[in-house]
Amino acid sequence: MENFKIAVLIAGSLFILFGYLRFITDDSGNVNLNNYRFTGGILLIISGMVDGTRDLVKRLRSKNSLSAITIYLGILLFYIGFSIQ
């Protein structure tokens, strides 16, 4: 059971990382590191999550909505992973 718990937590981490990296890249896939040096682009992530959640509620499929759903899935997997006894 411990191996399953670790696998779920690793999967949750990967989903959150994937969603985070989709938010901070531009259309050509580049990351401007000068903008994210100290904050990690946290304002960009928060605004992307708000826009993505708004798109999810409207049932639109956009870059932000896909990124938001992967982060939500990662958070859900974290919750499940830490709830496993």
Image (cartoon, rainbow, N blue to C red):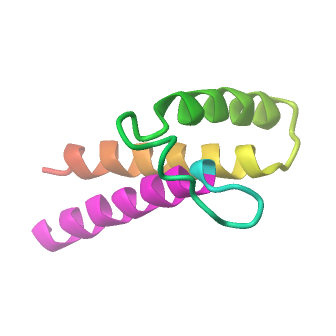
Whether residue 37 is situated above or below residue 81 in the rendered picture: above
Is-magenta flag for residue 23? no
From the top left corner, tell me how far across and down residue 5 is, in percent. Answer: 21, 62
Q: Could you say which quadrant of the image residue 25 lies in?
A: bottom right
Horizontal relation, residue 45 to residue 15: left or right:
right
What residue is drawn where x is 41% and y is 41%? 40
Please report the residue visible at 87 percent of the width from the left and 31 percent of the height from the top: 58
Q: Which percent across, then down, holds residue 63?
A: 76, 51
Residue 18 belongs to magenta span = yes
Which stretch appears magenta? 1-22
Residue at (43% x, 57% y) in the render: 17
Which residue is depicted at the point 58% across and 49% down? 24
Q: Main SS type for the magenta part? A: helix
Q: Is residue 10 rendered to the left or right of residue 70?
A: left
Quadrant location of the N terminus? bottom left
**Is residue 63 placed above or below 6 in the rendered structure?**
above
In the picture, measured across the screen, residue 68 lies left or right of residue 3, that is right
